[in-house]
Amino acid sequence: MKNITLAIDEETLSQGREYAKRRNMSFNALVRDLLARTVKPASTGIFEEFFRIADEAHGNSNGWKWNRGELYDREICRRKNIR
C-alpha cells in the first residue's frame, strides 16, 4: 500500500476525524473507503455488500419453508406474519 500526502483544511480534517471515530474507524480508513467507493466501478463488491447487509439483518422465517407461489400469496404471508 502506498502512502500519500494530502492537504486539507483544519475544519474538514477535524470533522472527518470525528465522523470516522463515530464509525469506529480511523480517518485513514475513512479516506481510503471514500476514495475506493468514488473511483471503483459500482459493481465491484456488490455481492460482498449484499451478503454483509443480509448477515446484519438477522431475519427469521420462524421455521417456515416457502415455495415460489406462496411468496406471492399475500394471505399466506399475513398468516405467517411475514412482510
Image (cartoon, rainbow, N blue to C red):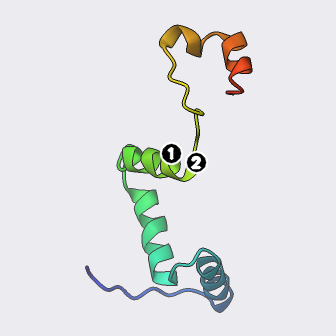
Left or right of 42 in this view: 70: right
Q: In this view, does 18 lie above or below 47?
A: below
Q: Look at label 2 and name its amino acid.
A: Ala
Q: Is residue 72 above or below residue 82?
A: above
x, y percent for residue 26: 50, 83
Q: Between 36 and 69, which is closer to the camera in this rendering?
A: 69
The disc placed on residue 57 is 2
Q: Quadrant of residue 11?
A: bottom right
Q: Specify the quadrant that holds the C terminus.
A: top right
Q: Evaluate whether residue 7 shows in this view.
A: yes
Image quadrant where one finds the N terminus: bottom left
Residue on which disc 1 sits: 54
Q: Hey, what amino acid is under mark 1?
A: Ala
Comparing 24 with 35, the one in front is: 24
Whether residue 40 is situated above or below residue 54 in the rendered picture: below
Q: Which of 32 and 25 is in front in this view?
A: 25
Disc 1 to disc 2, C-alpha distance:
5 Å
Residue at 27%, 82% (x, y): give it: 2
SS type, badge 1: helix
Instruction: Let me know if residue 42 appears in the view.
Output: no
Q: How crowded is mark 2: few (under 14 residues within 10 Å), some or many (20 or more)?
A: few
Residue farthest along the bottom direction in this orientation: 10
| Circle 2: element type | helix
How far across and down, in percent of the image, does residue 67 sit?
48, 14
Name the residue at 42% across, 72% down: 32
Residue 76, numbered label: none
* Circle 1/circle 2 CB separation < 8 Å: yes
Q: How crowded is mark 1: few (under 14 residues within 10 Å), some or many (20 or more)?
A: few
